[in-house]
Amino acid sequence: MMEQIARHGLFDLSIKANGDLHIDAHHTVEDIGITIGQALKKALGDKKGVVRYGHAYVPLDEALSRVVLDLSGRPGFEFNVTFNRDKIGEFDVDLFYEFFQGLVNHAGVTLHIDNLKGRNAHHIAETIFKAFGRALRMAVALDQRALEQLPSTKGAL
């Protein structure tokens, strides 16, 4: 799923993680989300010139998901996704939430993820990660008309 974020977000992304996988994947997945969030926050700096908001709808066969985000500086997370099974292969679907919660908390973004349709758990997950990549790509893009401005009327993000 990290490849989906990278491909659809047009981000260079390389991850090497060691964790307590002999117990379960929870901490490793959460730590990857935290680390990506920290990297995103650092890369955005003061956020001058960025579009700030991003959104994407992504379909895959019967599944359709929507991701909307704001590089607000404030962590907020809504995850409206129901999977019809507990695991995709050996991966616990609850960990998708943990990944994004860690990312949101450490990047300081507001993120809404909604699965609108779908039966196949893998398709649902894939649409979420593709949509996240596309929405983030939109939000971090530079607005050529406002390169020296913060995208906020308050003067800070």
Image (cartoon, rainbow, N blue to C red):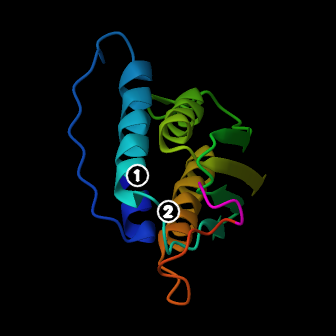
Furthest-front residue in this view: 155
Q: Residue at x 63, y 67 (%)?
A: 54
Q: Residue flagged by tag 1: what amino acid is it?
A: Leu
Left or right: residue 46 versus residue 13 is right
Residue corresponding to mark 1 = 40
Which residue shows up at 41% across the image and 59% down it? 44
| Residue 21 screen position, x and y as percent | 30, 18
Q: Which residue is mark 2?
A: 133
Image depth: mark 2 or mark 1 in front: 1
Number of the label disc, if any, that sits on residue 97: none
Residue range of the region highlighted in magenta in the rendering:
153-157
Q: Is residue 119 visible?
A: no
Instruction: Please check the rendered image and state whether residue 156 is part of the magenta-colored stretch, yes or no.
Output: yes
Q: Is residue 100 visible?
A: yes
114 drawn magenta: no
Q: Is residue 37 left or right of residue 108?
A: left
Rendered image quadrant of residue 38: top left
Q: CA distance from mark 2 to mark 1?
A: 12 Å
- Picture coordinates of residue 15 (x, y %)? 25, 45
- Nearer to the camera, 54 or 58: 54
The residue sitting at 49% across, 44% down in the picture is 107
Residue at the bottom extreme of this rendering: 145
Question: How would you rate the neighbour count of disc 2 (Cα within 10 Å): few for under 14, some for 14-19, many for 20 or more?
Answer: many
Q: Residue 80's x, y, as percent?
A: 76, 42
Quarter of the image where the C terminus is located: bottom right
Mark 2, secondary structure of its residue: helix
Q: Earlier in the sequence, mark 2 or mark 1?
A: 1
Q: Residue furthest top?
A: 23
Q: Compared to 132, does 84 lie above or below? A: above
Q: Secondary structure at mark 1?
A: helix
Q: Which of the pair 144/18 is nearer the observer?
A: 144
Task: Return the x and y of residue 53 as percentages of the image width and height.
Answer: 64, 66
